Amino acid sequence: MICLFLILQSLLIHPVRTVTVPDHSEKVGISVTGDLYLLSSTANTIYRLSADGQLIGQYGRKGTGAQFLNQPVSLWCSNDLLIHVADRNNHRITTLSRELGLIGQMEGIPFDGQEERFRYPGGVVVTPGGDWFILDTGNKRIIRLNPRQTITSLLGDIDAGLGRLIQPDRLILTENRLFVHDQAGATWQEFDGFGNTLQSFPDSLGTPASVLSTLCFVRQDGRILREKSTGEWQQLSLPEGSQVLDVVSKGNQLFILTNRLLLTYLLEME
């Protein structure tokens, strides 16, 4: 069901912190310790910044070997201080330590007596309980793994009915709500952990995020729309000419990555 959002009132919200990021940064991750991680698909590099924005480490350059990346498209900071990267053109998930040392690489998972190999992975997230969800874009599905990295279910595949994925390209986990963007339908589909489709939203609403357990959507112009809105909308103050590239939320904090800056906002949601 597509929720309707009414735009009747504007509230300008200013950032409480601004951090300059490396050129061509496209995705952001925030660890539980406050470290900042940036991904550049263009540079095939993961950057680590301190909480005050100082560059303190980096990993990767273009290639196929163990220390290389080839068009990484997403990163995820798990609660155990590991960094997981979907390395699209190397068809693998790379796991790094907090300091960006290589921990391991996964190219597939044993399943029913054979190895299910990834094809152009488009995202990876890990829940606080240790379950993994990997967006396997080439195979048009999401693979769910338990903490022992055994497949427990496949989401959105050919048997998914109304929840079948046609052209998935992005995976988001926000306060245990799992969303997949499907280019074919121009929608965000929400799944539960068992593979059931819960609801669908048009991607024109923006990128989903949860602020204090309230689902909202952030548009490229910084406009925030709340699910089941009572008529309010909010507007983030962005530098002139900026567009939102990525969104991460934690509690009442909203982290917005633009082409040159990482902006932190404190929000209140009724």
Image: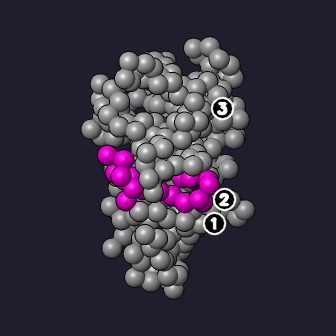
Circle 3 packing at 10 Å, graded few (<14), some (14-19), many (20+), is many
Q: Nearer the viewer, residue 45 or 137?
A: 137
Mark 2 and mark 3 lie on one chain; the one further toward the N terminus is: 3
Q: Is residue 235 magenta?
A: no
Where does label 2 land, which residue?
243
Residue 187 visible from this viewpoint: yes
Q: In the rendering, at what x and y percent does residue 242 appear? A: 68, 59
Circle 2 packing at 10 Å, graded few (<14), some (14-19), many (20+), is some
Q: Nearer the viewer, residue 255 or 72?
A: 72
Name the residue type under label 1: Asp
Residue at 63 percent of width and 66 percent of height: 221
Quarter of the image with the N terminus in it: bottom left
Circles 2, 1 touching at the beta carbon (< 8 Å): yes
Secondary structure beneath dot 2 equals loop
Name the residue type under label 3: Gln
Magenta residue span: 181-198
Where does label 1 land, which residue?
221
Name the residue type under label 2: Gln
Circles 2, 3 touching at the beta carbon (< 8 Å): no
Secondary structure beneath dot 1 equals loop
Residue 133 visible from this viewpoint: no
Label 2 to label 3: alpha-carbon separation: 22 Å
Q: In the rendering, at what x and y percent does residue 269 appear? A: 36, 70
Image vertical order of residue 81 relative to residue 106, above or below? below
Image vertical order of residue 80 relative to residue 205, above or below? above
Residue at 38 percent of width and 24 percent of height: 111
Mark 3 or 1, closer to the camera: 3
Label 3 to label 1: alpha-carbon separation: 26 Å
Tell me if 97 is positioned left or right of 37 in this view.
left
Tell me if 220 is positioned left or right of 127 in this view.
right
Where does label 3 land, which residue?
71
Tell me if 244 is positioned left or right of 208 in this view.
right
